[in-house]
Image (tube, helix red, strand yellow):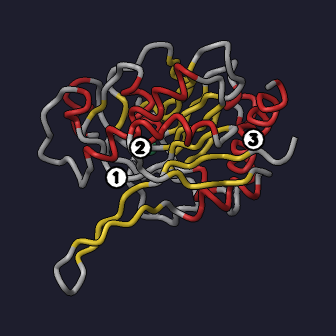
Amino acid sequence: MKKPIIGVLGSLNKEVMPSYEVLTRICCSIDYFQAIEKAGGIPIMLPITDKENIESQISLCDGFVFPGGMDINPLIYEEEPHPKLGINSLELDKYQYEFIKRVIFHTKKSFFAICRGYQMLNIVLGGNLYQDISEIEKEDGKIINQHIQLGHSSQGSHSIIVEKGNPLYDLVGEKYTVNSYHHQSIKKLGKDLKIIAKSKDNVIEAIEYIDDKRSFAIGVQWHPEHMAHQDDKAVTLFKKLIEAAKQEGEKK
Ligand code: MN
């Protein structure tokens, strides 16, 4: 099989022009595309589209990265907005929700879900979020880590403790240092998801989707695409996705 095609969901960027017209761009950090290429895949960006075209977008790809981006509008999981909720787009949320749902329930294709993509995966499977990490303190104990790091994005800032028996553990072992750019985090875990890593202050930092259809279905709260410039383990996570996409493509 040729190099697998990895679809990356595009985000929206709105900019007010001098004419006061709002220009909307489909965008995504270049680091996702570079990490996928470095790991042996061909990245393509998938723009927001009508529901009826999602199936065709999915069929173009052998595997997927559900990337980071803006906050998720809580209306999608039937909650009211917290005062600290950031910029969001319900239009983008509805598209990505539908896309991820179809990948999970209508295909056997592997995926790697990152930050916002990881949170959306949890919501698709019936979970929800702490809309601001300060909410954890009211229910689950103290936040001690800086989860919106000020250090450079290619460098890890807080540690995670990884559970045994999953591809993440096989790769990074019990303790790993990750970067951190989130003020939201998983609250209620979605169905068929397993927590595979937490930070020392008990924030859920990685999950695995448990099914027997695909060999790589991992979600992480950090940004391995930024770390891939200087951390071989971050590149290897993308390699695992690409190997899985390749194997599944060859079985077709
Ligand atoms: Mn974190």
Residue type (three-letter) at the residue carrying disc 2: Arg
Residue 91, relative to residue 203: is it above or below?
below
Q: Secondary structure at mark 1?
A: loop
Residue at the disc numbered 2? 116
At x 41% / y 43%, what residue is drawn? Answer: 116
Q: Is mark 1 within 8 Å of ligand 1?
A: no
Residue 117, relative to residue 192: is it above or below?
below
Q: CA distance from mark 2 to mark 1?
A: 7 Å
The residue closer to the viewer here, 191 or 164, is: 191
Among the two numbered marks 2 and 1 on one chain, the one whose residue lies closer to the N terminus: 1
Q: CA distance from mark 3 to mark 2?
A: 21 Å
Residue at the disc numbered 3? 242
Q: Tag on residue 240?
A: none
Marks 1 and 2: in contact by CB < 8 Å?
A: yes
Quarter occupied by the N terminus? top right
Q: Tag on residue 70?
A: 1
Q: CA distance from mark 3 to mark 1?
A: 26 Å
Answer with the quarter of the image where residue 186 lies: top left
The residue closer to the viewer here, 2 or 156, is: 2
Q: Is residue 14 rendered to the left or right of residue 219?
A: left
Residue 159 percent location from the top left of the image: 54, 42
Residue type (three-letter) at the residue carrying disc 3: Ile
The residue closer to the viewer here, 114 or 164, is: 114
The residue closer to the viewer here, 155 or 235, is: 235
Looking at the rendering, the quadrant in which ligand 1 lies is: top left
Answer with the quarter of the image where residue 219 lies: top right
At x 23% / y 71%, what residue is drawn? Answer: 22
